[in-house]
């Protein structure tokens, strides 16, 4: 319960930073995808039904602040969660480099799923090399942030799991 | 069966959430939108926090900016240093206020000139995703803002209101790949649609190959989309590419302003009177 609360608070704070940081720090059109890093972390280290619901709500919240079509980020982040969850059965993410790599790949899953949805369901817009460059920069930014965020989330999770409930 | 579901409940729930997302997206494919029950509540909760973070950051940035700028000058003695630091805080506050006043005065002049019923709004949050270019403003239904209205600034086009709550609104910026502003070249009156794109930044689409366009040509709103008033500056042509094949030429646009960095906007209804030069 306490660990779930930690992730709810983390989700809220990360979303808050995600919606304000780019206005304060000149990053061009790019936004550091903190929500994606949290979803990958949940898929790898805390795969519960609650985490799935949290991921969906986080994606929906990102939609509220970004997209003119609700559900796009909820869809993409749910896919990211599934990818991370399935990867967690095969790999054990224990080093910063590995966590950055998994987040980098997850960001590509997100970018590709968004573009697939746009191209097939929402518009007939074609995406070219420029879009790949866009996904690449977005994925790199997320990957660079991943080790620090993973470390902080792991520390918080371990601390709460080891805390004894007073009798 | 039940034990199978229990064993794979995480995966099962995740697939359900994917299906639920698609269910939410589905009406958009037909150009419709679902009612959003959570959005207004979330924006209302986040709004004061976003405003607080922004004001704190801008305050600190101005303070340290002034400090660095004045450091070399105020090095005579400790007493003067302390005094200068004291004044720096005051100065940065006044400079920020002066800059805000200047921006608001320009906005007010612009507003009284041609759009007296316009609503002045402050940007309080940006998009939470790199794939979408939107901002949240601090005015909503209660202030007369409605979906479909145009967001502009004295320097040019900002975007269009796509969602409104009672006290806030979401503006789709002109740089988003799903936006579209009916535009024309001021010199030749050639028309096209200015829109964002992930491939080439902001572009002007559907400009006929036969139309005469040069780098540096000014692009203004045509007013024909019924959203943006006619004659508002969008930007200039930064690159013209006529491919060997195809009906249209590819035009890249340098916007007159970066809509993502705008702090205040005017929200207006389309078909307003033409802007005078």
Image: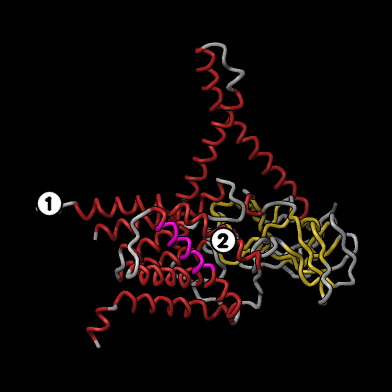
Q: Looking at the picture, do discs 1 and 2 lie on one chain?
A: yes
Task: Return the chain for callout 2.
Answer: A
The residue lying toward the viewer, choosing from A52 and A40, is A40
Element marked by disc 2: helix
Q: How many marks?
A: 2
Q: Which residues are magenta?
A: A98-111
Q: Is A24 rendered above or below residue B78?
A: below
Q: Is residue B111 visible?
A: no
The residue lying toward the viewer, choosing from A114 and A128, is A128
**In which quarter of the view is residue A98 placed?**
bottom left
Element marked by disc 1: loop
Dot 2 surroundings within 10 Å: few (below 14), some, or many (20 or more)? some
**In which quarter of the view is residue B58 placed?**
top right
Q: Which residue is mark 2?
A: A136
Residue lying at 57% horizontally and 66% vertically, measured from the top left: B163
Sequence order check, earlier mark of 1 and 2: 2
Instruction: Provide the major secondary structure of the magenta segment.
Output: helix
Q: Tell me the number on the disc at residue A166.
A: 1
Q: Is A34 rendered above or below residue A83?
A: above
Residue reaching furthest to the left: A167
Q: Position of residue A1 (x, y in %)?
A: 24, 61
CA–CA distance between discs 1 and 2? 48 Å
Residue lying at 56% horizontally and 61% vertically, measured from the top left: A136
Q: Are marks 1 and 2 in contact (CB under 8 Å)?
A: no
The residue lying toward the viewer, choosing from A25 and A12, is A25
Q: Is residue A105 magenta?
A: yes
């Amino acid at each position: 319960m306490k660990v779930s609360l930690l992730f709810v608070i983390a989700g809220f704070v990360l979303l808050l930073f995600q919606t304000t940081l780019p206005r304060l720090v000149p990053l061009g059109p790019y936004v550091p995808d903190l929500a994606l890093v949290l979803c990958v972390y949940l898929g790898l280290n805390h795969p519960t039904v609650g985490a799935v619901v949290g991921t969906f709500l986080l994606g929906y919240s990102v939609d509220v602040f970004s997209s003119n079509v609700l559900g796009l980020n909820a869809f993409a982040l749910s896919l990211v969660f599934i990818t991370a969850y399935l990867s967690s059965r095969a790999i054990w993410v224990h080093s910063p480099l590995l966590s950055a790599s998994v987040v980098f790949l997850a960001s590509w899953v997100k970018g590709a799923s968004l573009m697939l949805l746009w191209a097939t369901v929402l518009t007939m817009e074609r995406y070219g090399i420029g879009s790949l460059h866009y996904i690449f920069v977005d994925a790199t930014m997320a990957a660079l942030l991943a080790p620090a965020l993973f470390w902080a989330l792991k520390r918080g999770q371990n601390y709460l799991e080891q805390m004894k409930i007073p009798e | 069966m039940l034990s199978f579901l229990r064993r794979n409940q995480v995966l099962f729930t995740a697939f359900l959430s994917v299906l639920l997302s698609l269910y939410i997206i589905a009406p958009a494919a037909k150009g419709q939108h679902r009612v959003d029950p959570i959005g207004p509540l979330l924006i209302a909760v986040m709004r004061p926090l976003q405003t607080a973070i922004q004001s704190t950051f801008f305050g600190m940035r101005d303070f340290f900016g002034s400090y660095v700028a004045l450091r070399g000058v105020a090095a005579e003695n400790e007493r003067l240093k302390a005094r200068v630091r004291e004044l720096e805080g005051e100065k940065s506050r006044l400079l920020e206020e002066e800059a805000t006043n200047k921006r608001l005065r320009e906005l007010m002049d612009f507003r009284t000139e041609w759009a007296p019923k316009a609503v002045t709004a402050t940007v309080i949050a940006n998009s939470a995703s790199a794939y979408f270019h939107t901002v949240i403003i601090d005015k909503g239904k209660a202030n007369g803002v409605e979906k479909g209205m145009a967001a502009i600034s004295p320097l040019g086009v900002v975007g269009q209101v796509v969602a409104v709550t009672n006290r806030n609104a979401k503006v789709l910026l002109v740089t988003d790949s799903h936006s579209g502003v009916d535009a024309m070249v001021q010199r030749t009156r050639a028309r096209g649609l200015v829109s964002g794109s992930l491939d080439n930044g902001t572009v002007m689409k559907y400009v006929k190959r036969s139309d005469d366009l040069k780098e540096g040509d000014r692009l203004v709103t045509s007013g024909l989309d019924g959203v943006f008033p006619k004659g508002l500056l969008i930007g200039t042509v930064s690159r013209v590419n006529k491919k060997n094949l195809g009906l249209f030429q590819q035009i890249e646009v340098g916007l007159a302003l970066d809509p993502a960095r705008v702090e205040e906007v005017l929200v207006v209804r389309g078909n307003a009177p033409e802007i005078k030069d």
